[in-house]
Image (cartoon, grey):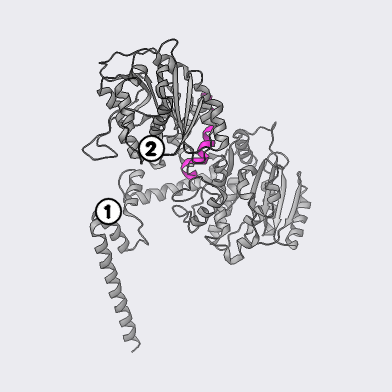
Amino acid sequence: MKTAELIGDWTRPADLFPDDGKRLLIYVVFDRRGEVGDFVVYALEHFRAFCDEIVVVSNGPLTAQGRERLEAVGDVVLERPNEGYDIWGYKHGLDAVGDRVAEFDELLLVNDTWFGPIRPFGPIFDRMNAHPLHFWGMTDHLRVEPHPFTSESDYLPYHLQSYWVAVRRRMFESPEWEAYWRDLPAMTTYSDAVTKHEGVFTEHFTQLGFSGEVAFPTLTDKIENHAVLYAEQLIDAGCPTLKRRPFFQWPAYLDRLAVIGKWTLEAAERNGYPVEMIFDDLARNVEPRVLNADAALLRVLSPTDDGYDPSRPLRTAVMAHIFYVEMTDEIIDRALFLPGPVDLIVTTPDAERARAIEDIIARRELPGHSEVRVVASNNGRDQAAFLIGCRDILLSDRYELIVKIHSKKTPQDGANVGRHFRRHQFENLLAGPHEAANVVALFQQQPGLGLAFPPTVHLGHPTMGHGWWANRPGVEELCTKLGIRVPLDEVSPLAPFGSMFFARPEALRLLAAQEWTYDQFGGPEAYVDGSLAHVLERMPVYAAGELGYHSMTIATPEYLAKSYTAFDYNLDQMSVTMPEDTQHQITFLRSAGYIGWGRFRDFVDMWVRLHRPGAADKVERGFARTERMRGLLWRARRRIRRG
């Protein structure tokens, strides 16, 4: 691959970076909480060897701790309103430096939309220092025609990507440079940021005779944004920056282009980058279901091998709510699959059940501590028993890992459906000794892992596309109350449906610290969608993410053999009437809007919205009149039949 690519017509003299040259870094950060992620500190610490002065600009106010962290790694820390994106952040930094910019030989304009350095900075600076030029960038973006943000008659120019642009003295001391920043237009949308700066900066200055280079030019003319779509290959080529976007891009788009985020993460890890910093940032800022797909956070649990390290066991407890006493032995059997001595904490709604459970435990002679707690009420079932009846344990440092499980029969569903749901939970969580040890090993290996639980149940359940049901408003309200700012997934939550999971107690602190009452959960009649119990079932991943803990889904090969084949067939059947790939199919259906109950009228409405949007109101009125006429005829026939 080429290691650099020239830009411009080279009509002006250009300079090497001097051996004793000085470099100024203006680094723009944004965090909706005003905090500063470890990945930002890590990047700035590594910049210090190459930059004589570091000016950090925060788009938005910082917390006291956030400012303190930046002041430890930067020379100047500025705060400004979050307006104008990173471009106006660069301008703010340039204005603050003012005439002092003349003290430097190179100016770096960089933002925090990447992780790194994945590969060392040194070789890049050494290589680019030796080239006479006016400006250079880390990666580029190909010309796109028609322009994706404007009209079809326009084009998005070839350009250096604005997250990293270096400018030499001849350019930043020129009147053209001064005029560019003086006349910088307002930017209120992401489209503005692209069309008014990033997409025009390179073409603007090359047309003025300035010359530049790109350190890692596009690998193929088939891909426009290779910094996102060829991230793994760029790392292997020596690129120190890994864009954050591959981990929050729409998964259907990445699927169409076969971009595998897990391979990118593995490339970062094998080059020594601490990937826990990546997950800490993404868990706080990305929809969990999107992250689960983009980073491929499903682990298939081997029935024969595991990576469990017996030399550093985790203090573990199984916390089981048992309503159906006859399931106690099965729960104990599965608890014993866990490696090392494991404690058993049982909650149950009355003293009679408690005595029966204690008798069963006594016969089993468990190796760890066990206790049975009678909760004050069965309101909220396992949710309330966990968050109220075991609150003292969850808020203590007694355990490093807990397994939440409960006796589940789902009698309200059909026999097959209820049986499958129970097996989906039990057999993916605690299938056997190797599988259980594999899950514990994940928590040993990933200090930022907060939860692990089975994938979304779909066999026998209409969960796909409907996972929020009536619970999203309650989740939104509770997130506001608890200060959870992790973005909610659009279609369905990433959640432990069935409410069984592995978790670090610290990851659940925001939920456990709340002083819930049994009255809030209501009686048996309240155990419906929209109730507190069902809202809380969808909360753990978002609560953990706010604290920087990511979540994973876990499944056995046996389960996936059943689940994937059903999924594969169902998707094939749904795709047969739609064009092209999954991305285009989703876009097609969304453009049609909600299609109701699949009646003839609903599909006519869908076709009209797609192909004759101006006639939609007229068609709707026509159907309304027809339905009124059918209603009148039906009532007339009834009167005739009654004589």
Q: Which mark is residue 84?
A: 2
521, above or below 150, in the image = below
Q: Amino acid at mark 1?
A: Leu
Specify the quadrant of the image occupied by residue 163. Answer: top left
x and y, in percent, of residue 140 in the image: 34, 27
Q: Is residue 283 magenta?
A: yes
Q: Which residue occupies 39% across, 38% down?
A: 254
Q: Residue furthest bottom?
A: 643
Q: Quadrant of the N terminus?
A: top left
The stretch in magenta equals 271-291
Q: Nearer the viewer, residue 407 or 20?
A: 20
Left/right placement of residue 398 relative to residue 84 reads: right
Q: Is residue 593 magenta?
A: no
Left/right placement of residue 413 relative to residue 105 reads: right
Q: Which element is circle 1 on?
A: helix
Q: Which element is circle 2 on?
A: loop
Category of crowding for the residue at label 2, using alpha-carbon neighbours closer than 10 angstroms: few (below 14), some (14–19), many (at least 20): some
Q: Quadrant of the C terminus?
A: bottom left
Q: Amino acid at mark 2?
A: Gly
